[in-house]
Amino acid sequence: MSESVGIVKTEYVTFDTELQLESGRLLGPITLAYETYGQLNPERSNAILVCHAWTGDAHAAGRHSSEDRKPGWWEDMIGPGKVLDTERYFVISSNVIGSCKGSTGPASINPRTGRPYRLRFPVLMVRDMVHAQKLLIDHLGLSTLLTVIGGSMGAMQAIEWGIHYPQMTRSIVPIAGTARTSPMAIALNAVARRAIYNDPMWKKGNYKHEHPPSDGLALARAIGHISFLSDASMHLKFSRRYAVKDGLFDFFGQFEVERYLEYNGYNFPSRFDTNSFLYLAKALDLYDTAWNFDSLEEALGRLRCPSLWFAFTSDWLYPPNQTEEAVACLEKLGNPVEYHLIDSDYGHDSFLVEPEKFTPILGAFLKRVTASRNSVDP
């Protein structure tokens, strides 16, 4: 029977260095928040890096205290007896730069001014996040990663690891991802941004922490939630039910789906920084595997390790054809690639809601990658 990793602690490490970003700007010093689960084996060959999505954090499994109501965001995946078995693997989860969950981001203090960066923070790309993660992996004394795995923005990070650190990355598992953000996804983020910009409390990023632009961020988050769901999942979860306490002909009455979006939207500003939300959205918009390469083929040609890709039938944010574009490119190049289209009604969130639909495939893949390493070890 699978169990939880139990009580865990978020660790922090600060690197007194300046990281050159894709924009040409320098960022430093850099603090990263991270958690680890399980133990390194004597060969230090069983490390797995888990990469989070847009507004995720380092807390992927377990609880911070016995009073915690919710475990980490990938609790169903990480722990003894689970697919990322902490009795077999050493699992690392790192919060990306640009976030507000312990790693350096717009809300952090700029050492040159002694005040928060706010909009003086440099624009980031997903590739910059991965270069910062490399500092952490080096800090942990690791020369190899068994796999890098993640969903959504985490999938983008996994792809970047395979391309830019091929000597360290033995395999990657991009889930519900894309090789380049589509115009539709960019358009959705543009509307979300406008919701924030139009909130007078935003003040061009100079809001006080205790008085964030809650209305704008709540609406932006609601837009995001819509893109994470699907028509089928909305029917399953809400149907056309009207809120019990509201009258059908009450002008301000709401359907249950409206109440859901409002509730989740207004919960969000209390736990996430608005400027971080905007910077990470910008990084998503800018994502293109082929950035600084002549083509997608040239970029993916550097991905020599085995890769396992998952897409979901009802995902309309990063639909299956976008994953299949990258997979077809790898197949044409003759690089080792495996692809599975998973039938699910839960839209882009399927990788969080129904992991049991792909974990058997993932477990078998990890065993093969482990065995391939053991077969060449002296």
Image (spheres, rainbow, N blue to C red):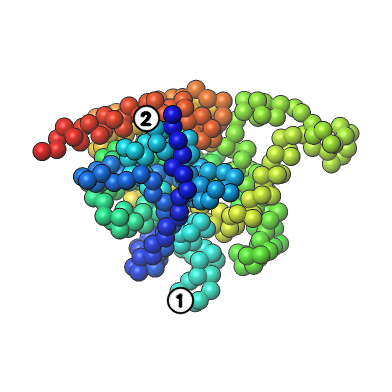
Q: Residue at x 18, y 35 (%)?
A: 374
Q: Residue 322 falls in which quadrant of the image? A: top left
**In x, y percent, where is residue 238?**
70, 29
Q: Nearer the viewer, residue 151 or 34?
A: 34
Q: Nearer the viewer, residue 102 or 183?
A: 102
Q: Which mark is residue 291?
A: none
**Tag 2: residue type?**
Leu
222 relative position to 56: left or right: right
Q: Residue at x 34, y 38 (%)?
A: 87
* Helix, strand or loop for disc 2: helix
Q: Quadrant of the C terminus?
A: top left
Inter-mark Cα distance, 2 to 1: 45 Å
Q: Residue at x 35, y 29 (%)?
A: 363
Q: Mark 2: give few (<14), some (14-19) or many (20+) Cα within 10 Å.
A: some
Vertical relation: 104 (above or below) 283: below
**In x, y percent, where is residue 99?**
50, 56
Q: Which mark is residue 362?
A: 2
Q: Nearer the viewer, residue 202 or 286?
A: 202
Q: Is residue 263 visible?
A: yes
359 relative position to 262: left or right: left
Q: Quadrant of the N terminus?
A: top left
Tell which tag, 2 or 1, sits nearer the viewer: 2
**In x, y percent, where is residue 131?**
34, 55
Q: Is residue 148 visible?
A: no
Count of marks, rendered view: 2
Vertical relation: 360 (above or below) 71: above
Pick out the residue farthest to the top.
343
* Helix, strand or loop for disc 1: loop
What residue is pinned by disc 1? 112
225 relative position to 365: left or right: right
Q: Earlier in the sequence, mark 2 or mark 1?
A: 1
